[in-house]
Image (cartoon, rainbow, N blue to C red):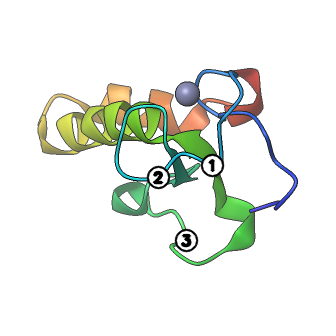
């Protein structure tokens, strides 16, 4: 993750890096391609700054897609999303 990142990769809003704890506006490290979908856990190219709340919502979507047997199309859609366009 680029240490100079200032905005959330999911919603595009600024992230207050001074916030502590797990509030929706706190910072977190988000995996651009979810680990559950084959994304690299430790690759710098696969992590980005995100709000804790945005990261949680995205993670919930990925888990829903993975466990939904008819969710293959949804999974593919998530993987194909360009994170810089969000
Ligand atoms: Zn956000």
Label total for image: 3
Q: In this view, does 19 lie to the left or right of 54?
A: right
Residue 36 picture quarter: bottom left
- Image location of residue 16, percent across then percent down: 65, 38
- Looking at the rendering, in which quadrant would you find the C terminus? top right
In the rendered structure, find residue 26 and report the number of the disc placed on it: none
Mark 1 highlights which residue? 18
Mark 2 highlights which residue? 20
> Which residue is more in the foreground, 45 or 76?
45
Q: Is mark 3 on a helix, strand or loop?
A: loop
Q: Marks 1 and 2: in contact by CB < 8 Å?
A: yes
> Which residue is more in the foreground, 35 or 77?
35
Q: Quadrant of ligand 1?
A: top right
> Which residue is more in the foreground, 20 or 75?
20
**Alpha carbon distance from label 2 to label 3:** 26 Å
Q: In this view, does 20 lie to the left or right of 36?
A: right
- Image location of residue 77, percent across then percent down: 48, 27
Judged by depth in the image, the label closer to the viewer, 2 or 3, is: 2
Mark 3 highlights which residue? 40
Q: In this view, does 7 lie to the left or right of 33?
A: right
Please tell me which residue is depicted at 48% across the width and 32% down the height of the picture: 25
Judged by depth in the image, the label closer to the viewer, 1 or 3, is: 1
Please tell me which residue is depicted at 35% across the width and 26% down the height of the picture: 74
Residue 83 picture quarter: top right
How crowded pointer 1 is (Cα within 10 Å; few <14, some 14-19, many 20+) is rated as few
């Amino acid at each position: 993750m680029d240490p100079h990142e200032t905005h959330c990769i999911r919603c595009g809003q600024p992230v207050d890096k001074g916030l502590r704890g797990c509030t929706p506006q706190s910072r977190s490290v988000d995996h651009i391609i979810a680990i559950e979908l084959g994304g690299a856990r430790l690759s710098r190219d696969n992590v980005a700054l995100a709000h804790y709340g945005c990261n949680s919502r995205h993670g919930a979507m990925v888990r829903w897609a993975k466990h939904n047997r008819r969710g293959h199309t949804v999974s593919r859609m998530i993987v194909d999303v360009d994170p810089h366009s969000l």
